[in-house]
Image (cartoon, rainbow, N blue to C red):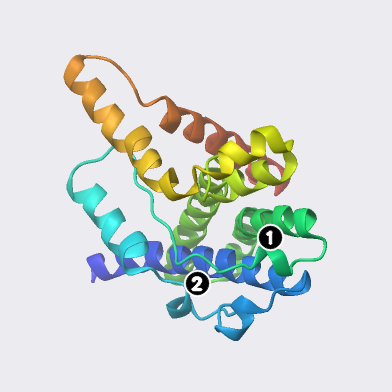
């Protein structure tokens, strides 16, 4: 039962986080004229529609089993036909931003919900408190991680949309190599650095710094500090 409880307090916040994140991309894409995701059923709060077997399940499990100092994963990307967007550049930026912004909103709602725990019996209040705590951690981490400026992450696509063309074009060409590059930066380099006696986990440290800063700010504005 203890393992089932531990599983539930991490699984539920994770499913909510990735589901709302991906559905937000599809919803904003539809608002800007591209109904591709809508036709494929991706503008949905059904988590099964968004789970990627490798990115959502196998990759985090593999990193956990290998003792990686940094765990991450991803959901099935929402398809977007950028040529169908009106206006195209603003649509691309706002579609990409919709996912991380949704995660930040979920983190704020989760933090604000701590004030309701006093009205619940002790046992469900403790279980819900763990869910809310993990929801804040997961949603803030997903927002910060996805804003890292490397395509195909949302931050990379935002950067491609706001940068001048002479910078946006070479950055956009990184998209097919973005995830392998992130694996090198987050997993391979730190592992190599550890063997050599150096700390190469600078990307993890940057993401951790911004995540902790955001969590502190969210707790403050929701009256939890």
The relative height of residue 70 versus residue 80 in the rendered view (above or below) is above
Residue at figure coordinates x 60%, y 45% from the top left: 155
Q: Residue 175 appears at what percent x and percent y?
A: 49, 48
Tag 2 near tag 1, CB within 8 Å:
no
The disc placed on residue 143 is none
In this view, which residue lies farthest toward the right?
Answer: 87
Give left or right: position of 219 versus 46: right
Which residue occupies the foreground of this view, 123 or 22? 22
* Residue 43 visible at all: no
Which residue occupies the foreground of this view, 3 or 59? 59
Q: Residue 153 appears at what percent x and percent y?
A: 53, 49
The relative height of residue 125 versus residue 71 in the rendered view (above or below) is below
For the N terminus, give its image quadrant.
Answer: bottom left
Residue of label 1 = 95
Q: Residue 54 appears at what percent x and percent y?
A: 31, 63
Q: Residue 30 appears at what percent x and percent y?
A: 72, 75
The relative height of residue 43 versus residue 94 in the rendered view (above or below) is below
Which residue occupies the foreground of this view, 173 or 46? 173
For the C terminus, give its image quadrant.
Answer: top right
The mark lying in front, picked from 2 and 1, is: 1
- The kind of secondary structure element at disc 2 is loop
- The picture quadrant where one finds residue 219 is top right
* Circle 2 crowding by C-alpha within 10 Å: few under 14, some 14–19, many from 20: few
* Residue 76 visible at all: yes
Residue of label 2 = 121
């Amino acid at each position: 039962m203890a393992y089932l409880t531990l599983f539930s307090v991490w699984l539920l916040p994770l499913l909510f986080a990735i589901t709302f994140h991906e559905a937000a991309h599809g919803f904003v894409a539809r608002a800007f004229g591209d109904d591709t995701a809508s036709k494929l059923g991706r503008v949905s709060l059904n988590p099964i529609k968004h789970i990627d077997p490798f990115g959502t399940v196998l990759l985090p499990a593999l990193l956990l089993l290998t003792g990686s100092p940094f765990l991450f994963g991803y959901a099935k990307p929402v398809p977007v036909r950028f040529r169908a967007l009106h206006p195209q550049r603003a649509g691309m930026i706002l579609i990409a931003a919709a996912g991380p912004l949704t995660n930040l909103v979920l983190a704020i709602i989760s933090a604000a919900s701590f004030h309701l725990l006093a009205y619940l019996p002790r046992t469900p209040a403790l279980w819900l408190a763990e869910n809310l705590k993990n929801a804040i951690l997961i949603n803030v981490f997903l927002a910060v991680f996805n804003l890292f400026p490397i395509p195909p992450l949302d931050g990379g696509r935002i950067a491609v949309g706001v940068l001048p063309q002479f910078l946006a074009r070479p950055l956009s060409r990184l998209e097919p190599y973005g995830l392998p590059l992130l694996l090198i930066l987050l997993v391979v380099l730190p592992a190599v650095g550890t063997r050599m006696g150096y700390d190469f986990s600078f990307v993890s440290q940057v993401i951790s710094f911004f995540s902790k800063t955001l969590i502190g700010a969210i707790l403050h504005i929701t009256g939890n500090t």
